[in-house]
Amino acid sequence: MASQERALYTTTATSLHGPDRVEFSDAEGRSLPVVAPPAPGGHDGEVWAPEQFYAAAIATCLHQAIAVVASEIGADLAESRVAAEVQLEHSGALRYSLRTRVVVELPAT
């Protein structure tokens, strides 16, 4: 665990049931509604599946880490993109797994 002196940022997300939502410790009572993964046909777009949060976190965290390194070496990140594809897999009774595929595009580097 990082010491308080070294910690740049700390946040906590708490998943709550009934109604399903995620609350954030650092966000003045903000919460986001969540649902189970959408069945074929999707959902109404007003709520998020946890796998979408995971994909967003992986893509943005990696992209920001690349930006830090790029700024140190003077690399151009114009039009850079990081995409994270998350696939939820069902492999038997009560057995699920996540598979993540990340694609990094650095066209100006």
Image (tube, helix red, strand yellow):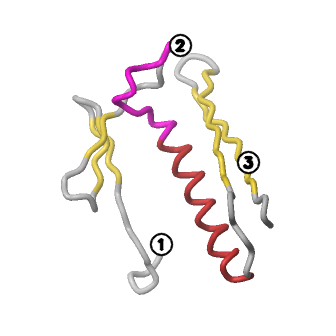
Pick the residue in front: 44 or 65. 44
Residue at numbered disc 3: 103
Residue at 36% over, 62% down: 11
Q: Secondary structure at mark 2?
A: loop
Residue 27: say if magenta: no
- Mark earlier in primary sequence (3, 2): 2
* Cα separation between marks 1 and 3: 29 Å
Residue at 64% over, 21% down: 91
- Mark earlier in primary sequence (1, 2): 1
* Cα separation between marks 3 and 2: 25 Å
Q: Residue furthest left?
A: 29
Count every numbered label the image shows and give the total: 3
Label of residue 40 in the image: 2
Q: Is residue 74 above or below residue 39?
A: below
Q: Which residues are magenta?
A: 41-52
- Going by the numbered disc 3, the residue's amino acid type is Val
Residue at numbered disc 1: 1
Task: Characterize the local packing of mark 2: few (<14), some (14-19) or many (20 or more) Cα atoms within 10 angstroms.
Answer: few
- Mark earlier in primary sequence (1, 3): 1
* Cα separation between marks 1 and 2: 40 Å
| Residue 28 rendering spot, x and y as whole percentages | 20, 58
Q: Which of the 4 image quarters holds residue 10?
A: bottom left
